[in-house]
Amino acid sequence: MDAVVTTNDIEIDEETTGDDLTNVPYDPAQVKVDYKPFSIFQVMRKIRLGEIDLHPDFQRRLVWDKTRQSRLVESILINIPLPAFYL
């Protein structure tokens, strides 16, 4: 038997509706999103110039072991495309 949900079954919390941005830890209008491919050379250059912060407050701990790190480097060297990642 399928359950049917009607609008009468939905409880709306008045405190969480609207444009209340007081709980947002950043200003979404200042988030820059840009879609363009970078070569490894370009990424390394940005790291050296300090344009990429490798140690932000929200960075998770090291999760890749040496084998996975090595496989990533190997993939780069044999020109296997990398999935999207965020800088």
Image (spheres, grey):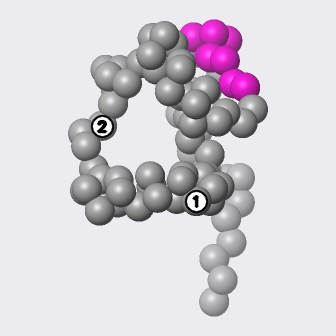
Residue 64 % position (x, y): 30, 53
Residue 40 position (above or below residue 42): below
Say which residue label 2 marks.
60
Q: Residue furthest bottom?
A: 1
Q: Quadrant of residue 72?
A: bottom left
Residue 26 seen in the current view: no
- Callout 1: helix, strand or loop? loop
User: Label 2: few (<14), some or many (≥20) within 10 Å?
Assistant: few
Secondary structure, magenta segment, majority class:
loop
Check disc 1 and give the amino acid type.
Ile
Q: Where is the N terminus found, in terms of image quarters?
A: bottom right
Residue at the image point whose x is 48% and y is 10% from the top: 49
Does 7 sit left or right of 62 as displayed? right
Calculate the distance from the C-alpha at mark 1 to the C-alpha at mark 2. 28 Å
Residue 44 % position (x, y): 50, 27
Does 42 sit left or right of 74 as displayed? right
Q: Is residue 14 magenta?
A: no
Q: Is residue 30 magenta?
A: yes
Residue 75 % position (x, y): 52, 59
Q: Quadrant of residue 58?
A: top left
Check disc 2 and give the amino acid type.
Arg
Say which residue label 1 marks.
78
Tell me the magenta residue range.
23-34
Residue 47 position (above or below residue 76): above
Counting residues from the N terminus, which is met first, the one under dot 1 or under dot 2? 2
Q: Residue furthest front?
A: 77
Instruction: Depth check: give the residue in front, 58 or 43.
Output: 43
Residue 27 % position (x, y): 57, 11
Instruction: Depth check: give the residue in front, 27 or 20.
Output: 27
Q: Where is the C terminus found, in terms of image quarters?
A: top right
Residue at the image point whose x is 36% and y is 57% from the top: 70
